[in-house]
Image (tube, helix red, strand yellow):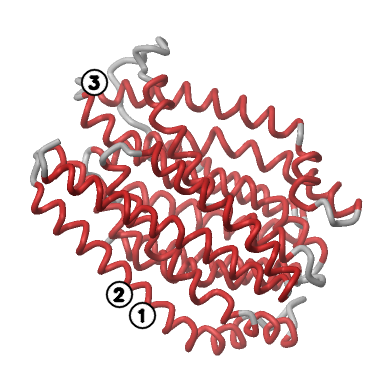
Amino acid sequence: MISIIVGISTLIQTVSQIVVTRIFGAKFELDVFLAAVVLPTIIVSTIYSTLSDVIIPLLKHEKREDVPSYILSAALYLGLIGLGVAIILSMFSKEIAVLLYGTQKGAFIVQTAFYLKYLLYSIPFALVNVVFGSYLYSQKKFILFPFVQLLGTMLGLGLTIWLAPIMGIMSLIVAFFASLLIQLPLIFPNPRSLSLSFKKAGVGILLLSWIPLIISAFAVRSDNLIMRSFSSHLPEGYIVYVNLVSKLFAAAVGIMTIGIQIIFLPHLVDLIHSNEIKRIKSQVAKAKLAAWAVSTGVILGTFIVAPFLMRLVLVGGKFTAYDVEKLISIFPYFIVPALGWGVSQIYFQPLIALRKQHQLAVLNVGAVILAWPTATLVSKAYGDLYAITAGLIVLLFTGIIGAEILWTRERKLLQQGQ
């Protein structure tokens, strides 16, 4: 059921990418927006993919009596912290744009900074949404939160189509916020009280557990920074092409592995607390095998079928047949990275369940440190498309291999009863 819901949501997101591309074309204006949205998107996706991984084990460990009240208090404080972060980052939006795209002309930097300043305010809304969604997952209510996210995606697409002729690129910013805002009232918990005590809300413990995971996930999601940064060196339109192809492959593997991810972690946490060592080992192995098998099959299917679909649905508006052929020509650069996207989170979850966030953070930061110089060297020798591929492979597979080594060690400790 989760895979179906997330699959529909991802399909709508893909349709949104196609609609936006046809409306605005592979032109400067859309290049600039995609450059601006990458950092907020990384932050929001990091929040969505990591915060529940911290809250669920904490709720199990703390055994709180009034969980809804705790959840509401945590959401309040995390939302305020997120608002503070958004304000600070927005004050330096131009400096961030220069840091990411310093080789670009002045107009590109100015416009990117303008959009970025607004998009950063999505952070507090994402934080509150995920706190509420984590509560649902902790109660084994797995369906509602993905369904609400689906509604948000549908609203975003509808607003984009409606507002684009009126507002231009700003319609994408409105749609981005609306897709987050609609989720809040639909997943609001039913608390008996609200504690305004920072200590009682347990936010300090939550942040201590979460910050290493933020660093780890942000490092993994720097794949988007690698793609946008190196594609910005290419001719006009390539940011759009790279964005579409990477979204296509990531969406394809994501649809088929998200169900494994959502169910796997709470189940694994329960097994660890009940100390069922044999079942832990078996479940982890099965989850990894399933992720590899599904990802491989989906990538091969996408590589065969997607070019036909791209020619069928993308040509129109400001997106030409020439643009589609350019887009299809870069498919091979993303086959191996797509395998990494499909399996990496499954490899990280056993460490998260054991609350080994610090080790995971060090591992993924190390992967970023290796990936950027690798991409830079390959760029100088072979060009920016090969640089993107090399950077992604080093980033993703360093994390996967390192996580497997760490899990092997932790598994042996579990077997020894330590």
Residue drawn at x 86%, y 47% is 110
Q: Where is residue 44 drawn, in percent x and y?
A: 54, 44
Which dot marks residue 316?
Answer: none
Q: In which image quadrant can residue 192 be found?
A: top left
Residue drawn at x 49%, y 66% is 250
Q: In which image quadrant can residue 57 be found?
A: top left
Q: Point out the tag, 1 or 3, that comes first from the N-terminus.
A: 3
- The foreground one among 316 and 215 is 215
Secondary structure under the numbered disc 3 in the rendered image? loop
Residue drawn at x 70%, y 58% is 34
- The foreground one among 229 and 87 is 229
The span from disc 1 to disc 3 (Cα, nearest Å) is 44 Å
Which dot marks residue 66?
Answer: 3
Q: Where is residue 279 drawn, in percent x and y?
A: 10, 53
Q: Quadrant of the C terminus?
A: top left
Cβ atoms under marks 1 and 2 closer than 8 Å: yes
Which dot marks residue 293?
Answer: 2
Q: Quadrant of the N terminus?
A: bottom left
Tell whether 264 sits left or right of 32.
Answer: left
- The foreground one among 156 and 71 is 71
Secondary structure under the numbered disc 2 in the rendered image? helix
Residue drawn at x 59%, y 70% is 389
Q: Amino acid at mark 2?
A: Ala
Q: Is residue 235 above or below residue 2?
A: below
Q: In which image quadrant can residue 271 be found?
A: top left
Q: Point out the tag, 2 or 3, that comes first from the N-terminus.
A: 3
Tell whether 382 sits left or right of 196.
Answer: right
Residue on which disc 1 sits? 297
The span from disc 1 to disc 2 (Cα, nearest Å) is 6 Å
Q: Amino acid at mark 3?
A: Asp
Q: Amino acid at mark 1?
A: Gly
